[in-house]
Amino acid sequence: MEVLRKMISELNRSSQLKWTLFSVIVNMLLTLSVWIGVYGMEVNSELSRLYFLDTASNSTTGNPVLDGAINGMFTIVVLGIVSFVMLGFVLYDFQNLVKTWLIFSCLLILFGVSGQTFYDLFSQLVDQETENGRNLTLVLTILPTLVYGLAGIVAFLANGSLLLHQCFVVSNCSLIAVFYLRAFPRHTTWFVLFIVLFWDLFAVLTPMGPLKRVQEKASDYSNNILKFLMFAADDNRQSAGADRAEEVNEGDGTIRRGVKQLIAMYSKQEAQDEEFAQKIRQRRSAWNPDSGLTEQSPLVETEPSPSVPTEHQQEEKEDKQMDSESSSESCSESASIASGDSNADDKEKEEEDDEYQSSNIETAEECDMETWQQLVNEANAKQGDNKSNLTAADALNDGETVRLGFGDFVFYSLLIGQAAASGCPIAVVFAAAGILFGLLVTLTVLSTEESTTPALPVPVLCGTFCYFTSKFVWENLIMRTG
């Protein structure tokens, strides 16, 4: 019960968690819409015969279950080979090759997979018996494909909005899931889902896992590369409501912390200036003991007052008098240089003291508006520089943003699509509920800020259990009542 209360409390508190669960629901619904509406849950026999064992082709063991097991192992082996090849590129600093690979994969989905889906959709809506119908199908396919692809480029490559990126992550993962559903023969999907759980645990948690090793090199890449790999839920959304207000308050606090850091920096600089001035005073006294410089000299004044304009003139007059009384040409020249440096340093310190009158400024009410605005602008500029230099490791270790890998969305949708192929709507609903419950457990109970938590095992196990249990109960109930 304590765990359940914690889950409910986290769900009510975090808008990121709600948004992530909502995005998963949309992903599953979009997958079902394409899988059922466009393809009628039919497997593409040409794809199946080309890559997998299938009882409908000559490449088969004669046992559909054994075919599914072999196909599942083959799929995970291919996945592992691709993952380790990418790991090798990352470890040996082939950064341009890694980026090219990710960009090419993204473009292939945006234009290739989406274009095939649009073509299959319009092929059913337009008569293909005539040449005009076929030409119309091509035109209707090209236009939405170009729009979808160009918008996707904005989302992934041109720093589009976070919401746009999230929408394309959901839609792209749905397209990939449908492609797998059409390619996998009967029983293969279940074996793939079962074996991928162990692969996910190995890849994320073990020291030699490819995802674990890639994270160790994440500091070598910009945080922008995560756009091609992960879904990020952020509170910076207009619909965040109370969270948006909290964010504004946190932003004010961040600005105040930045301003206080700047003030501390200026205070430290003032101390260094005072130490430097003290050294110059001692050196000048050693060169010319009759110069008359004391602790009350303007050179060592710790709190200069910019409202008395004659102090600089008085200081220059004393410096000239000191130079004229020097006994040797070398001492006079050295004292003059030291005096000039000291005057410049003292003038700069006076300007800083005039601008930053107190090291305890925390709010705008404690100083004039011009001073506060300048402090805020400098703090924001400092934060902007830090964000521009943000690495992928910084983004992954922020401990605040909820993230899911693209593969998580794909396999969630794969499970839902396979459940729908059974023809039992109740089982599909329970499977979706199981996935959402497992994901909630993963994000609230199992996840920690210190390490990455695999987001596939618990949701897939819960979804599979709910699917088979509900299907068994529903079918037995119908059989008894029938």
Image (spheres, rainbow, N blue to C red):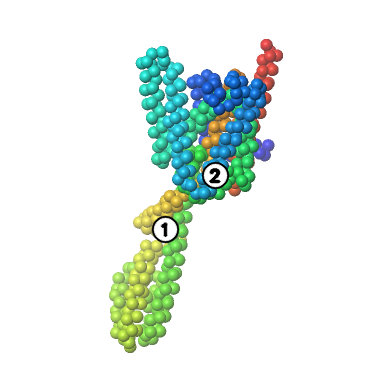
Residue on which the image places disc 1: 366
Task: Identify the image quadrant of residue 141.
Answer: top left
Query: In terms of depth relative to the viewer, which is nearer, 258 or 337?
Result: 337
Please state, as top left, top right, bottom left or bottom right, where the C terminus lies in the image: top right
Residue 213 vertical position relative to residue 277 in the rendered view, above or below = above
- Residue 297, how many percent across, how many down? 37, 78
* Mark 2 crowd level (few <14, some 14–19, many ≥20, 10 Å Cα): many
Q: Earlier in the sequence, mark 2 or mark 1?
A: 2
Q: Which mark is residue 381?
A: none
For mark 1, give the secondary structure. helix
Residue on which the image places disc 2: 87
Q: Amino acid at mark 1?
A: Glu
Residue drawn at 66 percent across, 26 percent down: 66
Q: CA distance from mark 2 to mark 1?
A: 54 Å
Residue 194 vertical position relative to residue 387 in the rendered view, above or below = above
Residue 235 vertical position relative to residue 71 in the rendered view, above or below = below
